[in-house]
Amino acid sequence: MCFFWCCSLADDRVLRLVLASESPRRKALLESAGIVPLVVPSNADEEILEAGGLEPGELVKALARRKIRRVVAGRPEDYVLGADTIVFIDGRVLGKPRDREDASEMLRAISGRTHEVYTGIALYEPRGRTVLDDFDVTPVTVRRMDEDEIRWYVDTGEPMDKAGSYALQGTGGFFVTRIDGDSSSVVGLPLPKVYELLRRAGVALDEILTRE
């Protein structure tokens, strides 16, 4: 038995939730909650928007909105969900590393310390042609990593497409000692915040989890 997203409008058309991300982690989180999204990668520029001087929460919301923009252009009748995650420490934004040295530098920065993980989400609501957004922030503490551990972890390749150069749900979980908040947000999609956006969009729970 499985579930899928649907929402019936006045003309009885069924709309799916489109996930504007090719992240298998975000897709898996939605599926764990009973929603099987249609995955349409946005192919948006992943460069961090720093020029505007945005606070981290506003930054991740702007990045999430940017991710859904291209997808909405091709699917204006569907609900479209986008998300983006950054690590924030010492007033510095850590996105995905550029290369191995950048990944190692990020791991040194968070080693033995507590940092904040910000995840922004944006939801396009087709009935009103509006975009709703929100963000979550979660403090995460990482044990002290020596240079051999950093080198070994970078060699696994896992850090190379992860904000802050680690994955809670992967090998990087060995090094995380404390999470003060929502673990789904640290993985990349805060499920309680997603639910709140759906409620704000006027979507009832029985419209989301519909049996095939």
Image (cartoon, rainbow, N blue to C red):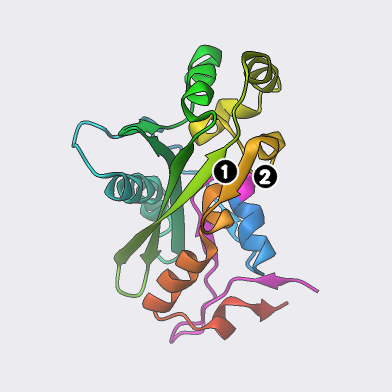
Residue 73: x and y in percent read 36, 52
Which residue is tagged 1?
Answer: 22
Residue 172: x and y in percent read 66, 35
Mark nearest the camera among 1 and 2 is 2
Q: In the rendered image, which quarter is residue 28 located in?
A: bottom right
Any mark on residue 169, and which?
2
Is residue 178 or residue 121 the one in the foreground?
178
- Helix, strand or loop for disc 1: loop
- Of the two numbered discs 1 and 2 on the same chain, state the one appearing first in sequence: 1
**Where 76 sits versus 197, above or below?**
above
**Magenta stretch: includes residue 39:** no
Is residue 153 or residue 122 the one in the foreground?
153
Residue lying at 37% horizontally and 76% vertically, measured from the top left:
200
Query: Dot 2: few (<14), some (14–19), or many (≥20) neighbours within 10 Å?
Result: few
Horizontal relation, residue 56 to residue 117: left or right: left
> Is residue 188 in view from this perspective?
no
Residue lying at 34% horizontally and 61% vertically, measured from the top left:
133
Residue 114: x and y in percent read 48, 40
**Where 51 sits versus 30, above or below?**
above
Q: Which residues fall within the magenta stretch? A: 1-25
Residue 100: x and y in percent read 56, 14
Q: What residue type is labelled 1?
A: Glu
> Is residue 166 in view from this perspective?
yes
For the N terminus, the quadrant is: bottom right
**Where 196 sits versus 53, above or below?**
below
Inter-mark Cα distance, 1 to 2: 17 Å
Query: Dot 1: few (<14), some (14–19), or many (≥20) neighbours within 10 Å?
Result: few
Horizontal relation, residue 146 to residue 119: left or right: right
Is residue 70 or residue 46 the one in the foreground?
46
